[in-house]
Image: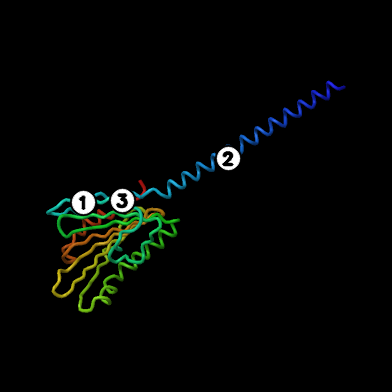
Amino acid sequence: MFRRTARSTRSARTARTARTTAVLAATAAAATALVLAASTTSTAAVTAPGFLAGTDLPPHPGSAWYAGKVTKGLPEFPPFCADGVLPATGSWYRDFGTEFDTNAVQVSVRTSSSAAAMKLKAALERKVAACAADWLRTMPGGTASWQDYGKLSVEEGAHVYGVHTSMPESEPGVHLFGIGRDGSTVTFVRWGQMGYLHEAPLPAFKKTTVRAVNKLNP
C-alpha cells in the first residue's frame, strides 16, 4: 500500500511540474509576442515616409537642386500658405534649394488613421485655397491671385494649386502647392520663386506631386 501511494504522489508531482512548465512556456511566448508587436509598432511609428529627391523637382534651367536632410518635426518657419495646419507630431520635412531664388519644401505627416489623414488633407486644401485672400488682409497695398489646377489620380488623391503675390516696388512671387495622401500619410509640397503664375512649371510640378505621393510608403 505505501509503495503504491508513493508512486501516486510522484506521478502527481510530475504532472504538476509538467503543467507548470507548459504554463510558463506559454506565458513566455505570449510576452515575447507582445514585445515583438510593440517593437514593430514603435518602429513603424518613428519611420519617416519616403521623400522626394532633388531630381524629382521641376528642372531649373541654371542650377541643380540641392536637397537637405529628411528631418523629424516641422521647418523652423512654417511653409507659406500652410501655417497653423501642419502638426508637429508625426511630421518630417525636407528643404530644397538652387543657386538662384527658386526653392521648395516637402512636409509629410504620418497620422493615426486614414480618417485623420483625410481630415488633414482637406484642411490643407482649404488653407491653400484661402491663402491669397488671407495674405491680402495682412499686406495692404499688395496684390494676390490663385488658381486651382485640379486633382491628380494617384493613390488616395492629390490636388495642385498656385498662388501669386506681389507688393509695390518689390519682385512678385509665385508658388505651386501639391497636397496628396496615401493611406494614413499626407504630403505637402511647396515650390516657389520670383515670377508669375503663367511662368510656373505646372506640368513638371504635377509630375513632382505624383512622385511625392508615390514615394510616401515605400
Return the residue found at the far bottom: 140
Separation (CA) of disc 1 from disc 2: 48 Å
Q: Quadrant of residue 91?
A: bottom left
Type of the residue with mark 1: Tyr
Q: Residue at left 26%, top 71%?
A: 132
Type of the residue with mark 3: Val
Q: Position of residue 143 (x, y in %)?
A: 20, 75
Q: Position of residue 161 (x, y in %)?
A: 27, 64
Q: Residue at left 41%, top 49%?
A: 46
Query: In the rendered view, does 114 fall on the left or right side of 69?
Result: right
Q: Residues within 10 Å of mark 3 (few under 14, many from 20)?
A: some
Where 16 sits versus 94, above or below? above
Query: In the rendered view, does 34 fall on the left or right side of 65?
Result: right
Label 3 sits on residue: 70
Q: Earlier in the sequence, mark 3 or mark 2?
A: 2
Separation (CA) of disc 3 from disc 2: 37 Å
Label 2 sits on residue: 30
Q: Earlier in the sequence, mark 1 or mark 2?
A: 2
Please give the label number shown on residue 57: none
Q: Check disc 2 and report its element: helix, strand or loop.
A: helix
Return the residue found at the far right: 1
Q: Check disc 3 and report its element: helix, strand or loop.
A: loop
Label 1 sits on residue: 66
